[in-house]
Amino acid sequence: MKLHKEGYAIMGGTALLLLLINWAVRYYIPELVWLHWLLLVASLVFFFLIVQFFRVPSRVVTSDEARIIAPCDGKVVVIEEVVENEYFKGPRRQISIFMSPLNVHVNWNPISGVVKYFKYHPGLYLVAWHPKSSTDNERTTTVIENSQGVEILFRQIAGAVARRIRWYVKEGDEVQQSTQMGFIKFGSRVDVFVPLDAEIKVNLNDKTVGSVTVLAELPS
């Protein structure tokens, strides 16, 4: 298992801080051996939790131009028809995936194509399942157009804990399906907007595997 580059500084800083705390307790309170062991175990557990936020698992990715692939790990919390006002300014079907702190936090491109639109929006840090998080929270909006001219929009959305969004795409880039497009530190939510005639392949509360799970199929 690999560790993501976005976590190097946090993991290093956390390890150093925990080492200093453990050293200080042993140095200033040498007689409390039970406390030394308790603190050591707690430190190892805490560091393990931090490390698992930044894991990058090896996967056999899904690649199919007719399919829209999940851009992240998580749970499907919304499937509904909405009016998308930022780019399409019209009806689309929205699929929202909630990323818990225990999920892999890498984000992948749901289709292959050209990035036609990208915008970063500063904003609030409402909890990710709040109805207004999609429009009021810190977020990015990315639109990819495939070779058939179909455009898919997806948003990385920061939450109450996740306040660090990273992206590796810009307008004009040609991207491949199921390759990394960004990272959301410590979980949050990703919204995907698909055409109304796309056939949805997931249900509410389904677990998704980023770069693998098929969210929808485009009409032939």
Image: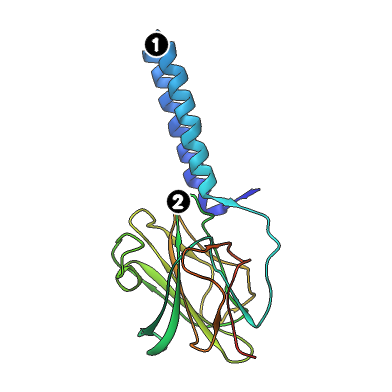
* Amino acid under disc 2: Pro
Q: Earlier in the sequence, mark 2 or mark 1?
A: 1
**53 horizontally vs 140: left or right:** right
**Which of the two residues, 74 or 26, is positioned nearer the viewer here?**
74
- Which residue is depicted at the point 46% across and 68% down? 204
Element under disc 1: loop
Q: Position of residue 56 (x, y in %)?
A: 61, 53
Q: Position of residue 84 (x, y in %)?
A: 38, 84
Name the spot of residue 192 as percent of width and height, x first.
47, 75
Quarter where residue 127 is shown: bottom left
Instruction: Give the label on residue 101, or none.
Output: 2
- The amino acid type found where label 1 is placed reads Leu
What residue is rendered at 54% in x and 55% in y?
104
Q: Which mark is residue 149?
A: none
Q: In the rendered view, tell whether residue 73 sits above or below residue 83.
A: above
Residue at horizontal 66%, vertical 82%?
Answer: 65
Q: Residues within 10 Å of mark 2 (few under 14, many from 20)?
A: some
Tag 2 near tag 1, CB within 8 Å: no
Residue furthest right as drawn: 60
In what quadrant of the picture does the C terminus appear? bottom right
Q: CA distance from mark 2 to mark 1?
A: 34 Å
Q: Name the residue that disc number 1 marks.
A: 32
Name the spot of residue 73 as percent of width and height, x first: 53, 60
Q: Is residue 123 above or below residue 161?
A: below
Mark 1 closeness class: few <14, some 14–19, many ≥20 residues within 10 Å: few
Q: Quadrant of residue 98?
A: bottom left
**93 shown above or below 42:** below
Which is in the foreground here, disc 2 or disc 1?
A: 2
Helix, strand or loop status at disc 2: loop
